[in-house]
Image (cartoon, rainbow, N blue to C red):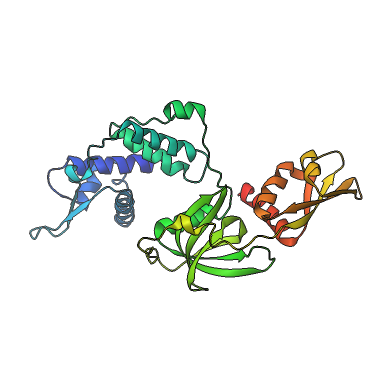
Amino acid sequence: MSRRKTERLLNLVICLLATRRPLSAEHIRQAVPGYDAANDEAFQRMFERDKNELREIGIPIEVHKDPWEEDPGYRIVPQAYELPEITLEPDEAAVVGLAAQVWQRASLAEAASGALLKLRAGGVETDEAGGMLGSALELRVDTQDPAFPALWEAVRDRRVVRFAYRAAASESVLTRTVEPWGVVSRRGRWYVVGHDRDRDAARAFRLSRISGPVTPVGRPGTVVVPEGVDIRSMVGYREEPVQERTALIRVREGTCQGLRQVARAVRPGTGGWDELDVDFTDPGRLAGWVVGFAADAEVVGPPDARDAVICRLKGVLA
């Protein structure tokens, strides 16, 4: 958001808070800097857009229609705008601080920081460092799976999604249409849990097995989470059996000692490369390890393991 627009929105809020009677659009145009220089059509578009943006962030702009006036009036009632008193116990404030610390470098960093800022604005002291616990442990959540942001937004918006999914122990990729109920982590892996429309049953999908983009389907608010459903209990119990497979990885001579140590077989290749046979069960975890060796390692196969590396690199580039 530009500085000019930010100042205009702030001035609009101050104007609507300070007035004792509803102001018409024309009065607002004359009173708020940033509107006066615009022509009639530009002002109407700008004013409507500004009202919508303020309402989206929770600022209650009321519309009053006076039978003696041709145009409606606008104002913000201070009692509806002011943040109510917030009281948190010391342990609750510590949890809020730890939550913000966990998401500091993940996809929810902006939301966590915004929550802390609002609490501080209300006079609540939050222990962002986590007290003695925070000084001893530094918590982080790894959400490097490219599908995480889109799925988290779908859960938040109660919106159906569609994505390509590779089943465990298989190279086949099928399209799944899912009503997401939640995104949870188990043993370092992230899952989306919801109703699989293709199977007409509740299912858990590992994010590292999702190929390509996650596409929203239909309008927000259409997904209904069943009452009493335990999302966490579904992860791990409905998961398909995992079969160990072998990946063929090319590494430059004299590099990638970590991969060489875990390889089942190491043999000379051509052109300054060696070939490694490395056992794995999850292409996503293998990809996360291999990309750490940068240009010194290349996954040759199987195709889903190679695709997982390409997807991880594209995610980092994006």
> In the rendered view, would you say 163 is above or below 130?
below
User: Which quadrant of the structure image shows residue 112?
Assistant: top left
Question: In the picture, which quadrant includes the N terminus?
Answer: top left
Is residue 196 at least partly visible in the picture? Answer: no
**Nearest to the observer: residue 85 or residue 258:** 258
Q: Where residue 312 sits: x, y (%)? A: 65, 51
Q: Where residue 301 sits: x, y (%)? A: 77, 58
Residue sitting at x 31%, y 54%: 52
Q: For this view, does 184 lie left or right of residue 210?
A: left
Is residue 262 at least partly visible in the picture? Answer: yes
Q: For this view, does 254 lie left or right of residue 121?
A: right
Residue sitting at x 33%, y 48%: 57
Q: Where residue 62 sits: x, y (%)? A: 20, 52
User: Which quadrant of the structure image shows residue 300?
Assistant: bottom right
**Nearest to the observer: residue 112 or residue 244:** 244
Q: Where residue 168 sits: x, y (%)? A: 64, 63
> In the rendered view, would you say 219 is above or below 63?
below
